[in-house]
Image (cartoon, grey):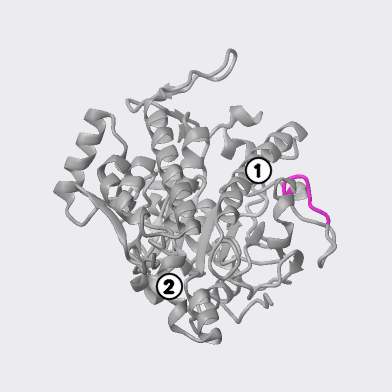
């Protein structure tokens, strides 16, 4: 039987549903080309992706930065969960986010840290609607490669935050709660609801049909896969063994995420342990106010789901550009399940207290374990060029603050994951000696086909090869 040849844009379709497929061998018409063209076609079928993951409030730096420069560095306690991916890991020290410094604008380091991190621009100090910042690296990438995918970019999040009002020393809340900026005046609101993201990824172009599909699924307790079953069965019959296996793994993963989404929605707010400060609860189950910030009692379920949405979006080539803050600046999310049932922001102002520093290190390590969870998922999905999605991606993980107690923005805590489809020499600790972090963003953009002459306060490129 001849093998089915499919378009990269083939979807499984049902009422209100359009499930994008992972990249399959059947989508690579190698039999039409010579050997060199076959290799080029396979490489082209492995898209290059870029993502920025952000953690707020600084890092406990003694547990973060390796003392050795080069390939023979030792993983520090906070980075130890990434040991399995050491060959795809580049620790970047010495990078600076100067536009997060006051530069004459006084207090407001948290607002500037998040808003200047990807833009390299000095945010205008205002509490009103006259925001001014700069285009962020992710949106610059989306301008170049966004037309190749269904979504030009995805802006995900864990805390919805606010876009109006005062949040940090005279700065609008939009600055403290926004990582991605479409232009110098337009912050991009992030989607913090895993169910909403799932529905966006798997809905068709008709919003009424998509809404009807979801209502039917919830009413009848059906999976989204039930709506595309006939289409899937017809397609499976024409696939080769490897593609059938990939399809089975992918559809199983989609169903598993649906089950976890239902669990996340059903999970109610968890009361604090005996002796803990009792915050006031919002009307929305699962969120509470603590120290002026909203915390999420479902965080331990919520974050892995958002990371799984990243995996699905990259696997199906629905987008090649993603941002995800693990929390917003000044977040007081607590991490009881990680042994740190303390407000994050308050704890970051440790004033040298060893007990608070130990709690902050636990929060930092927990976040890194979630990063390792994402890397494991991305590395398990192999692509046509012989590498994994992780190998074909560049993922920056870091913060616009360094030491949260000092509010400094030099020597940023930052690591780069992935190999950029073989364009990055990873597995080492690189000291960048005070260059703007935007230099790194430009180097990343070069490797995903989104080159720019400059970005914000950039002065050149960081050498990654």
**Which quadrant, please, contains the N terminus?**
bottom left
Secondary structure that dominates the magenta span: loop
Q: Which residue is mark 2?
A: 140
Q: Which residue is mark 1?
A: 364
How crowded pointer 2 is (Cα within 10 Å; few <14, some 14-19, many 20+) is rated as many
- Residue 77 covered by magenta stretch: yes
259 or 164, nearer to the observer: 259
Q: Specify start and end residues of the magenta stretch as a single range.
A: 74-79
**Which quadrant, please, contains the C terminus?**
bottom right
361 or 49, nearer to the observer: 49
* Furthest-front residue in this view: 1
Q: At 50% across and 50% down in the image, what residue appears?
A: 325
Image height check: is 58 above or below 465?
A: above
- Structural distance between the alpha carbons of marks 2 and 1: 29 Å
Counting residues from the start of the chain, the first of labels 2 and 1 encountered is: 2
Q: Which percent across, then down, holds residue 141?
A: 44, 72
Residue 255 seen in the current view: yes
- Secondary structure at badge 1 equals helix
């Amino acid at each position: 039987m001849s093998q089915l040849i499919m378009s990269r844009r083939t979807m499984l379709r049902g009422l209100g549903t359009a499930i994008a497929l992972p990249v399959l061998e059947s989508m690579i018409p190698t039999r039409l080309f010579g050997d060199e063209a076959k290799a080029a076609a396979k490489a082209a079928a492995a898209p290059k992706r870029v993502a920025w993951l952000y953690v707020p409030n600084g890092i406990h730096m003694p547990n973060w930065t390796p003392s050795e420069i080069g390939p023979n560095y030792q993983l520090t306690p906070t980075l130890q969960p990434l040991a399995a991916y050491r060959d795809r890991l580049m620790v970047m020290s010495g990078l600076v986010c100067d536009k997060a410094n006051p530069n004459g604008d006084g207090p407001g380091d948290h607002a500037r840290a998040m808003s200047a991190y990807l833009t390299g621009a000095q945010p205008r100090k205002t509490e009103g609607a006259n925001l001014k910042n700069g285009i962020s690296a992710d949106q610059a990438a989306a301008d170049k490669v966004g037309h190749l995918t269904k979504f030009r970019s995805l802006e995900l999040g864990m805390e919805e935050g606010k876009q109006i009002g005062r949040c940090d020393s005279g700065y609008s809340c939009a600055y403290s709660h926004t990582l991605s900026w479409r232009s110098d005046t337009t912050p991009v609101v992030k989607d913090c609801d895993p169910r909403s993201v799932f529905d966006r990824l798997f809905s068709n172009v008709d919003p009424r049909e998509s809404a009807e599909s979801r209502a039917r699924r919830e009413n009848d307790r059906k999976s989204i896969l039930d709506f595309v079953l006939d289409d899937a069965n017809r397609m499976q019959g024409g696939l080769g063994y490897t593609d059938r296996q990939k399809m089975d793994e992918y559809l199983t993963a989609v169903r598993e995420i649906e089950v976890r989404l239902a669990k996340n929605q059903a999970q109610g707010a968890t009361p604090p342990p005996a002796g803990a400060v009792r915050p006031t609860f919002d009307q929305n189950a699962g969120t509470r106010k603590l120290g002026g910030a909203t915390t999420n009692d479902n965080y331990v379920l919520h974050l892995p789901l958002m990371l799984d949405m990243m995996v699905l979006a990259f696997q199906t080539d629905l987008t090649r550009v993603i941002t995800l803050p693990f929390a917003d600046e000044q977040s007081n999310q607590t991490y009881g399940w990680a042994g740190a049932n303390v407000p994050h922001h308050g704890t970051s102002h440790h004033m040298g207290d060893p007990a608070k520093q130990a709690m902050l290190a636990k929060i930092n390590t927990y976040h890194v374990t979630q990063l390792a969870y994402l890397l494991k998922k991305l590395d398990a999905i192999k692509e046509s060029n012989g590498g994994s999605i992780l190998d074909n991606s560049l993922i920056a993980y870091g913060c616009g603050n360094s030491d949260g107690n000092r509010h400094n923005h030099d020597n940023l805590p930052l690591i780069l994951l992935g190999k950029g489809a073989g364009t990055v020499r990873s597995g080492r600790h690189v000291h960048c000696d005070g260059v703007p972090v935007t230099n790194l963003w430009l180097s990343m953009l070069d490797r995903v086909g989104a080159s720019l002459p400059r970005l914000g306060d950039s002065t050149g490129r960081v050498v990654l090869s």
